[in-house]
Amino acid sequence: MFNDLVNKMSLEFPDILREVITEKDLQNRIKELAIEISNDYRDKNLLLICVMNGSVFLTVDLVKSLTVPAEIDYITVGSYNGGTESSGKVTLFRDVQIDVTDYDVLIVEDILDTGRTFSFLVDHFKSKNPKSLKTFSLLDKPDRRIVPVELNYRGFVIPDVFIIGYGMDFLQKYRQVPFIGELRPEAYS
Ligand code: IMP
Ligand code: MG
């Protein structure tokens, strides 16, 4: 059944080279992390910050599995001019609307790559003086790190390949793919 789906996806998305993380493994890991977060945030005032657009599916699935109250806001930042290479400069497009001073903030990112986006976000939220600040990333590509980032919750460590799916895009496409896939290098070279 699942193999049928993968075959169907690769037919419809010929630029996907292979499946890196299955939908089932993704969902299981998110549930595990939700249990950990629920334990850590008992008696806290949790605010999840969804980093748009890549973290949108992840934030929805994560919050649904939490057993403690949580609020959500979102922030939109970008460092890509399209394609697979970051420009290196992070731009804030839309800030959160909530005053975070009374909240235990958890930044929810799809993928930690060079670390520039996360270090920008951590500085940005620190300057707003939340009650506490922690970091979550579903995926981590440690081989690519340029700026060091302290990650409090990590889903999976992945190799240095360009990935798409589960919210992550290449030129705004492939976000709808339910698993994490590797993009064919020919697609962007
Ligand atoms: P960083 O600033 O280099 O750490 O990059 C972080 C952002 O770049 C992530 O939030 C993603 O939006 C994007 N990104 C990094 N690597 C990939 C990838 O392999 N596929 C899709 N987006 C990526
Ligand atoms: Mg992102």
Image (tube, helix red, strand yellow):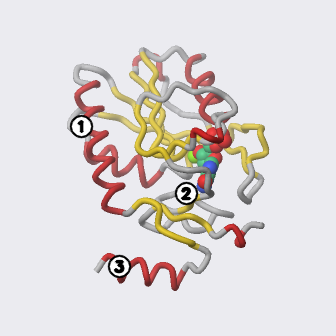
| Pointers 2 and 1 in contact (C-beta within 8 Å) | no
Q: Is residue 178 above or below residue 102?
A: below
Gap between marks 2 and 3, in whole Å?
21 Å
Q: Quadrant of residue 69?
A: top left
Q: Earlier in the sequence, mark 2 or mark 1?
A: 1
CB of mark 2 near ligand 1 (< 8 Å)? yes
Residue occupying the point 51% across, 70% down: 18
Q: Is residue 158 left or right of residue 59?
A: right
**Residue beneath label 3, please?**
3
**Residue beneath label 1, please?**
35
* Coordinates of residue 129 in the picture (x, y in percent): 52, 14
Q: Is residue 166 left or right of residue 82?
A: left
Which image quarter holds the C terminus? bottom right
Q: Quadrant of residue 132?
A: top left
Q: Nearer the viewer, mark 2 or mark 3?
A: 3
Residue occupying the point 41% across, 38% down: 72
**Residue beneath label 2, please?**
168
Gap between marks 2 and 1, in whole Å?
24 Å
Give the crowd class for mark 3: few <14, some 14-19, many >=20 residues within 10 Å: few
Q: Amino acid at mark 1?
A: Ile
